[in-house]
Amino acid sequence: MASLASWTLVRANREQTIESRKRNFHEWNRGLNIDQYLKLHDDLDIYEHAADAKLNTWVLVDRNDPSSLNYLCACETYRRTGLVATSGGVKEVTAYAVASVYTPVVNRKQGYARQMLRLLHHVIGIKGGLPEFPAEWGSPPSSEGFGDGKFSILYSDVGPKFYTTCGPTPSAPGWIVQNPYEVVWTLEGHTDGDQSRVKLLKDTDLEDVLAKDAALIKKEMVGATGPCVSFTANNGVNNYLVQRSIFRTVLTNGRRADAWGAVLPEHERQPFSFLTWTPDPLDFTITRLRADPESLPVLIAAAKKIAAERKAVEIVAWAVPEGLQEACKVLGGVQRTRTNHLPSVHVYDADGEKFEWIHNEKFSWC
């Protein structure tokens, strides 16, 4: 195996990006053929979550052949606006979601993905929050146009340990799993509750609701009891899941969903309360939840009704706040530890302060 210094990380060109999608098609196509799969990605690339170079593919290559299609492994990053709360207040920052980490079978078990992700920190991380680049890795990869991330997240499908070994130096930790729990409601024996107060949300309604939610998240983080980071679901972040579901439905001639969430009318005794979801029968998941113990039963009843109509067998909510867990239990929700999509975070902080990732719900997934 070549020395670590012989590899580098580069932003993929168009041909390398297409090649990366062809490679991971076999594991992530979910019933699409190759033409449909490539079209799905091309169609999604025009939306706000990816447009204006927010989405980038990265490839680990031989330093002497950076444009080669014979690269070793690949991943993607999405640039997003994040929030960071410290004793100094709440700030909007640039942050990144890492996705689609993929190594061809022939290249696995050789350390390529680990080195790719170690180098990625030095591309996306803010320089003041990174340790010195290890000399044994050769010269650093270019961070031109990047190098501004205060934190980055990913969702592990290979357990809780691997990504912790992918830090910015051989001894520094990488992405650490936080709050890998979900609440599940089964739909067996479901009966519709009172839906008179609920307004179902169309896909075109979501951005206004989520923008209001984002403003509240920023305001609430002022009172955080310790350092924390968060994404918000507006600005196209949750819409990625919506458009992904719509395009898959069109490509497979499925039945398009009409409802993508539910909201309660706001008044003096009823604070702003809503939830959004992905309506896939095989993966009906609440993507963002804002509720209290009084509003939760009505919102969950609305989700159950739509899930039953979509022929789903269960509803899942990620990272339910502690203040709602007892209310979820009363409604038949069961908490369990996830075995995939484990939410993991790395904060670029020179002081090594520990940050909590809050609101790590399904809307952040990519």
Image: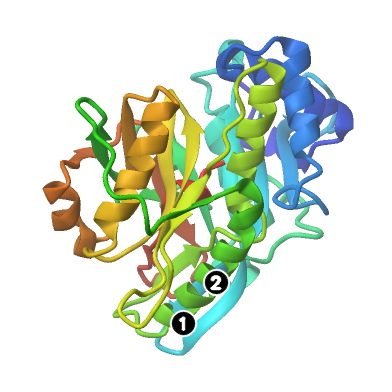
Q: Position of residue 289 (x, y in %)?
A: 39, 56
Residue 301 got which mark? none
Q: Nearer the viewer, residue 320 or 356?
A: 320
Q: Residue at x 55, y 58 (%)?
A: 233
- Judge depth for marks 2 and 1 and give the one in front: 2
Q: Quadrant of residue 79?
A: bottom right
* First along the sequence among labels 2 and 1: 2
Q: Is residue 215 above or below residue 284?
A: below
Q: Is residue 258 visible?
A: yes
The reply to whether dot 2 and dot 1 touch (C-beta < 8 Å) is no
**Secondary element at image label 1:** helix
Left or right of 354, for residue 151:
right
Q: Which residue does the numbered mark 1 point to in the structure image?
A: 219
Label 2 neighbour load within 10 Å: few <14, some 14-19, many 20+: few
Q: CA distance from mark 2 to mark 1?
A: 11 Å
Residue 260, image x and y in percent? 53, 44
- Looking at the image, residue 169 sits to the left or right of residue 142; the answer is left
Horizontal side of 33 relative to 296 (left or right) equals right
| Residue at the extreme bottom of the image, as rendered | 88
Find residue 361 and report its horizontal and vertical position in percent.
42, 51
Under mark 1, the amino acid is Lys
Label 2 sits on residue: 212
Q: Amino acid at mark 2?
A: Lys
Describe residue 346's horizontal placement relative to residue 113 as left or right. Answer: left
Locate the C terminus and report the quarter of the image it occupies: top right
Numbered disc 2: secondary structure: helix
Residue 166 appears in the figure: no
Residue located at (25% from left, 53% from top): 297
